[in-house]
Image (cartoon, rainbow, N blue to C red):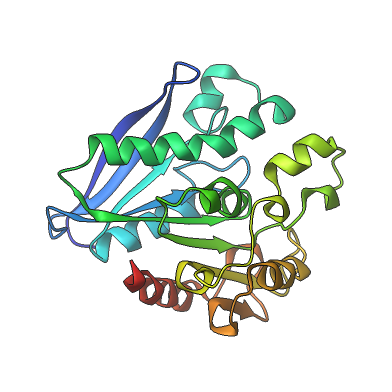
Amino acid sequence: MIDLKIENIDIPIKSDNIKLKGSIYYTSNTPLKAPWIIILPGFLAHRGTKFVKAFCERFADAGNYVLSYDYRDHGEHLKKTHSFDFIKTTPKIFSDIHEVISWIIETQTERLLGKKIALFGRSYGGAIILTHGFIDERAKILIALCTRYDYSTVQLKISDDLVKKMSPKYFIDNNPLNNERILIAHCKDDLRMPFENILQIKEHLGLKSENVLVYEVGGHSFKGHRDELFEKVKDFLKKL
C-alpha cells in the first residue's frame, strides 16, 4: 500500500436531517480526478469491518477514490442510537444510496473523473446495489457479491410490503446494457446466502456467463479467492 490516506466525513441525508459517517480512501498516487467506488457493507457490518476495509484499501491502491459509510443504526450510528428497528429503518437504508451518490456529485466535483461512479457490495450491500443502485443511472457499474434475490425466503417474518422494498426481484429488469454494467459473484458453499440466488439474478438480468463469477468454495467471505476476485473486479471496472 502506497501512502494510504483516509478522510473521515459526514454525508448529510437531507430528507431526515441526519448525517451518515463515512471514510474516503485514496493514496498519494491517486490522480486529482479519478473514478469513485462506493463500498456497501453487509447486514450489521460497517465501514470498519475487515472485509470492507480490505477492499477499500485495494481499490484505493488501484487509483480510485473509495467511499465507505455506516448505514443508519450501524457502526458509529449504532453507538449513538443503541438500537436498530429493522422494519422501520431498512427501507431508508436502501434508499440512502441515492443521497450518497448525490453527495459525491455535488461536493466532490474536483475529484470525480467524469461521471465514473461504481458500487461494490456484499450480501445486504449487494441487495442495496441491485435495488436502488440498479434504478439510479448515475451508478455506472454495479458489482454485487452473494446477494439475495427475494427476501421472502428469509426465516425472519417480514411483511410483503417490506420484501418488495428490499428484494432485487422487484427492481431489476432484463436490459442489453446489463452486461456492460453488472458483475455478480457467489460461492457455492455460502451458508448464509443460498447459491440459487445468483442463478435467479443471472436469469432475471440476462447476464452472460462471464458476468457471473462462481467459486466452488470460499463461503460468504470468498476465503481463498479474494485476490482473484479483486483482479476480476478491477478488470471489469475498466468499463467505467
Q: Is residue 99 above or below residue 216?
A: above
Pinpoint residue 10: horizontal percent, then vertical percent.
34, 28
Residue nearer the viewer, 206 or 155: 206
Q: Is residue 173 above or below residue 183?
A: above
Q: Is residue 91 left or right of residue 210?
A: right
Quadrant housing residue 180: bottom left
Q: Residue visible at 23% across and 52% down?
A: 26
Pinpoint residue 79: horizontal percent, then vertical percent.
53, 23
Q: How many marks?
A: 0
Residue nearer the viewer, 6 or 161: 161
Q: Residue visible at 62% across and 51% down?
A: 127
Q: Residue visible at 52% across and 18% down?
A: 80
Q: Is residue 45 above or below residue 220?
A: above
Q: Which quadrant is home to the C terminus?
A: bottom left
Residue nearer the viewer, 61 or 117: 117
Quadrant housing residue 64: bottom left
Pinpoint residue 207: horizontal percent, then vertical percent.
60, 75
Q: Which quadrant is home to the N terminus?
A: bottom left
Residue nearer the viewer, 61 or 198: 198
Pinpoint residue 184: horizontal percent, then vertical percent.
57, 69
Q: Is residue 107 left or right of residue 12?
A: left
Q: Residue visible at 77% across and 70% down?
A: 196
